[in-house]
C-alpha cells in the first residue's frame, strides 16, 4: 500500500473561517481586556477560577502581544512563558467560537476537505486506511467535516462509532493536542458557559515551548514510513520542523536505508507554503531535502491546498 501523510498548518482550515497565525495573535490580544467585558463577562474576574493571579498574565498579553511583531501567539508564549495558562484559555475561546461558527457546508468551487472525502469515503466505509494526517492545529474542523459526511453518506447514527471508522481510514494526530474527541466535546456547541468551556478545552492543548515527545515520536513514524508527504497550509515553524526532519530526528540514516532498499525510494514531497519566498527556499534546503535528498520537490508555494493535492499521483 502506498503510504500518504498529510501535514496540516493553519492555512489548511482557513477556508472554514479559522484565523492564520498573525490574526489569531491579534484576536487573543484584543480578547485579553482586563478592565472591559467580553459579552458581559469580566475576563479577569473569571480567570481567577482557572489560574491564580491571572491579572499579570492578562496585562502582559494586552500590553505586549500585538506590539511584539511576532507572527503567532505560540511564538509570543514561548518568549513570555508566564502568560501560557491565560493565553491558552484565550486561544481556546477564540477557536472554539470559530468552531461553533465555521462553514462546513458544500463549497460551490469545492475545497480540499471535499476532495479528500470523496477519495477516502470507501476506506471510511470499509475500515481501510487511506492516509495518515499530522496537524499542527488545535481545532477539529476536518474531523467534524468527515463525521458529517460519513453519517449522511452511510446512514450512521452513533458519533463515537463513526469517529472510530474515520480514525481507521484517516488517523489524525494533533501534534500539540486538541479540544477533545467529538464524541465527548461536541463541535457545534459549548458545554455550558463559554469561558468554562474554553478553560476545559485549553487543558488539552500544548504550545511550542512545552515538551510533547510522544506525539513527535508517532509523527516521525508516520513520516518515516511515507511514500508521499503533502504539506498543506503550513508556515514550517522551525520549532516543529527541527524535531521532525533534522539529523537529530534521524532523517539522513533513514534516507540511506530507503535508498539501499531497492523496493523503497525517498518520499515524494508536495507542499503549499504560508511564508515569504526567501524563507521558502531556505525551508526546502534545510528540511524537505532531508526527506527527498536531491529529488524534486513538487511545490505550489502559495498555491492553495487543493492545488497541492491535485499534484499527488495517487489521488484521482
Image (spheres, helix red, strand yellow):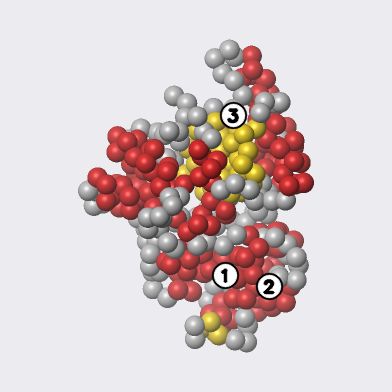
Residue shown at the point (63%, 38%) measured from the top left: 299
Q: Secondary structure at mark 2?
A: helix
Label 3 crowding class (10 Å Cα cut-off): few <14, some 14-19, many 20+?
some
Q: Secondary structure at mark 1?
A: helix
* Total numbered labels: 3
Residue 159 in the image, given as x and y percentages of width and height: 30, 52
Which sits in the foreground, 297 or 166?
Answer: 297
Which label lies toward us, 3 or 1?
3
Q: Earlier in the sequence, mark 2 or mark 3?
A: 2
**Label 2: which residue?**
61
Residue shown at the point (65%, 79%) measured from the top left: 55
**Label 1: which residue?**
90
Q: Are marks 1 and 2 in contact (CB under 8 Å)?
A: yes
Q: Earlier in the sequence, mark 1 or mark 2?
A: 2
Q: Quadrant of the N terminus?
A: top left
**Label 3: which residue?**
268
Image quarter of residue 78 = bottom right
Label 2 crowding class (10 Å Cα cut-off): few <14, some 14-19, many 20+?
many
Residue 181 in the image, given as x and y percentages of width and height: 41, 54
- Label annotation for residue 81: none
Residue 150 is left or right of residue 9, and the answer is left
Does residue 203 appear anywhere in the picture? no
Distance CA(mark 3)–CA(mark 1): 38 Å
Q: Is residue 181 above or below residue 196?
A: above
Amino acid at each position: 500500500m502506498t503510504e500518504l501523510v498529510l501535514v496540516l498548518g493553519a492555512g489548511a482550515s482557513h477556508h472554514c473561517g479559522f484565523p492564520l497565525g498573525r490574526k489569531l495573535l491579534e484576536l487573543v490580544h484584543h480578547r485579553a481586556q482586563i478592565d472591559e467585558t467580553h459579552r458581559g463577562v469580566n475576563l479577569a474576574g473569571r480567570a481567577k477560577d482557572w489560574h491564580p493571579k491571572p491579572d499579570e498574565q492578562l496585562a502582559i498579553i494586552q500590553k505586549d502581544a500585538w506590539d511584539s511583531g511576532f507572527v503567532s501567539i505560540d511564538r509570543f508564549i514561548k518568549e513570555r512563558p508566564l502568560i501560557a495558562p491565560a493565553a491558552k484559555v484565550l486561544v481556546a475561546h477564540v477557536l472554539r467560537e470559530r468552531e461553533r461558527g465555521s462553514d462546513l457546508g458544500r463549497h460551490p468551487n469545492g475545497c480540499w476537505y471535499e476532495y479528500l472525502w470523496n477519495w477516502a469515503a470507501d476506506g471510511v466505509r470499509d475500515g481501510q486506511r487511506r492516509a495518515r494526517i499530522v496537524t499542527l492545529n488545535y481545532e477539529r474542523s476536518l474531523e467534524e467535516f468527515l463525521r458529517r459526511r460519513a453519517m449522511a453518506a452511510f446512514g450512521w447514527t452513533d458519533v463515537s462509532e463513526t469517529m472510530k471508522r474515520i480514525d481507521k481510514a484517516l488517523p489524525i494526530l494533533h501534534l500539540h493536542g486538541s479540544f477533545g474527541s467529538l464524541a465527548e466535546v461536541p463541535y457545534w456547541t459549548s458545554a455550558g458557559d463559554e469561558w468554562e468551556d474554553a478553560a476545559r478545552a485549553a487543558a488539552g492543548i500544548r504550545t511550542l515551548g512545552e515538551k510533547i515527545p510522544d506525539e513527535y515520536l508517532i509523527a516521525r513514524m508516520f513520516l518515516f514510513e511515507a511514500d508521499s508527504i503533502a504539506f498543506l497550509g503550513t508556515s514550517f515553524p522551525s520549532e516543529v520542523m527541527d524535531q521532525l526532519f533534522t539529523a537529530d530526528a534521524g532523517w539522513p540514516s533513514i534516507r540511506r536505508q530507503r535508498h539501499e532498499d531497492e523496493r523503497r525510494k525517498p518520499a515524494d514531497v508536495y507542499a503549499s507554503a504560508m511564508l515569504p519566498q526567501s524563507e521558502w527556499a531556505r525551508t526546502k534546503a534545510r528540511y524537505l531535502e532531508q526527506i527527498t535528498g536531491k529529488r524534486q520537490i513538487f511545490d505550489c508555494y502559495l498555491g492553495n491546498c487543493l492545488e497541492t493535492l491535485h499534484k499527488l499521483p495517487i489521488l484521482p
